[in-house]
Amino acid sequence: MREWHVAFGRYLICLACASSTACAPVQLSRDSMHRPVIDTILSERSEAELSGWLSYRGEIAIYDSLEALRLGLVYPYAVCGVVDPNLNLSTKQLDGRKVRVTVERFEWNSLSREAGDIPTRRMLNGQFVNNGCYGRYVIYVKQLTVEP
């Protein structure tokens, strides 16, 4: 009987705490995210400068906020692409860092399907791009600098 009282007491405490903003944990949800900056910029220009957080998982992804990166959100909060090989960057070492990139935007559906029978893989300036962000755009990074 005592176990039931303890469990019920914990339930009441949780219920009271949840109704109070002072003790309710702050959680970011997909519904509370801001308007995606990356998609807005790329919709307006084919060449742009973006600031965001870089993720490397075989291809790069630029996220418009640290929260979007942590939640693993996809388009429109992130855009995938490839880096100009002449930049000689180790993108693996930049994973999770805030960066500023100068990019050229390409429509995913307009890219060549020279990559064979893999429907999620296309060619962008001689490199494979998978579009793991599932966006309507992919990017070709021409310049990249790490931000403090």
Image (cartoon, rainbow, N blue to C red):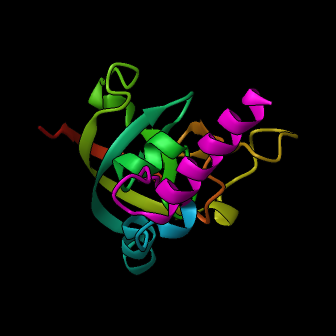
Q: Does the magenta stretch include residue 11?
A: yes
| Residue 90 shows in this picture | yes
The quadrant where residue 3 appears: top right
Of residue 13 and residue 25, the one placed in the foreground of this image is 13
Q: Main secondary structure of the magenta part?
A: helix
Q: Residue 141, image x and y in percent?
A: 36, 46
Of residue 21 and residue 83, the one placed in the foreground of this image is 21
Q: Residue 94, image x and y in percent?
A: 32, 26
Residue found at the very far right of the displayed protein: 117
Query: Which region shows up in magenta?
Result: 1-29
| Residue 140 shows in this picture | no
Locate residue 54 relative to residue 132 in the image: left or right: left
Locate residue 1 relative to residue 55 in the image: left or right: right
Work out which quarter of the rendered image holds the N terminus and state it: top right
Q: At 31% across and 50% down in the image, what residue appears?
A: 52
Q: How many labels does the image show?
A: 0
Q: At 63% across and 61% down in the image, what residue appears?
A: 108
Work out which quarter of the rendered image holds the C terminus and state it: top left
Q: Residue 44, image x and y in percent?
A: 39, 80
Q: At 60% across and 41% down in the image, what residue appears?
A: 10
Residue found at the very far front of the displayed protein: 1
Q: Is residue 13 magenta?
A: yes
Q: Residue 85, image x and y in percent?
A: 38, 30
Q: At 36% across and 72% down in the image, what residue appears?
A: 41
Of residue 49 and residue 23, the one placed in the foreground of this image is 23
Locate residue 79 relative to residue 84 in the image: left or right: right
